[in-house]
Amino acid sequence: ELDLRDRLQVATCVCKGWRFLKDVSHLWTSMRVAGSSSESSWRDRGSHDRVTVSNSGLTRLLDWVGAASLTELRLHTGDAALQPWTVTSTLSAVPAIKVLHLGGKKVNAAVMEATAKAAFAPTLREIHIGEDVAGSEARIL
């Protein structure tokens, strides 16, 4: 399976004929996102298993892939890149999350409250909280 970054690039950049891939929901069940304070594209930086986005970029990315199909979200806010309001609106837009990783300085009380009130909260299997979204400091199963 291709990394998230490669899947996005194939579905958006290769050719118009491949843009139908955005509608293949099983390609977009897991997403690893890191905040960036610039409006740079997800193609510009970062590792292949995550995309780097701004506040507005995260909203556009979720709209494009169809947030309803996501079952795993790894979200790192960066030092101050993704604001708490962006994170809380993201959490309200992803109803099927089963595994959630939250990290970064902007994961605050409002974000945790939004997590507890989110539509996915009753069926959440794992939540990881800490600086590293790949292997976090605190793990609640």
Image: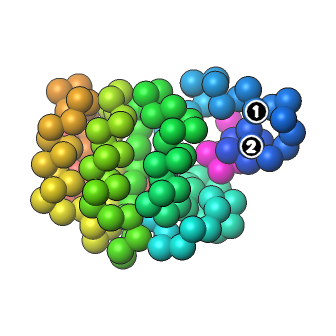
Contact (Cβ within 8 Å) of mark 2 with mark 1? yes
Q: Residue 28 lies in magenta, yes or no?
A: no
Position of 94 relative to 128 (above/below): above
Give how far apart the Cα atoms at labels 2 and 1 are.
Answer: 6 Å
- How was this image coloured? rainbow
Mark 1 burial class by Cα count in 10 Å: few <14, some 14-19, many 20+? some
Looking at the rendering, in which quadrant would you find the N terminus?
Answer: top right
Tag 2 secondary structure: helix
Position of 30 relative to 86 (above/below): above
**Residue 137 shows up from this direction:** no
Looking at the rendering, in which quadrant would you find the C terminus?
Answer: top left
Image mark for residue 12: 2
On the image, which quarter does residue 92 sit in? top left
- Callout 1, which amino acid? Arg
Image mark for residue 101: none
Residue 78: % across, % down: 40, 70
Tag 1 secondary structure: helix
Q: Earlier in the sequence, mark 2 or mark 1?
A: 2
Residue appearing at x 74%, y 47% in the figure: 9
Mark 2 burial class by Cα count in 10 Å: few <14, some 14-19, many 20+? some
- Callout 2, which amino acid? Thr
* Residue extent of the magenta highlight: 1-6
Residue appearing at x 13%, y 59% in the figure: 109
Residue appearing at x 44%, y 60% in the figure: 55
Residue 96: % across, % down: 35, 27
Disc 1 marks which residue? 19
Residue 6: % across, % down: 71, 47
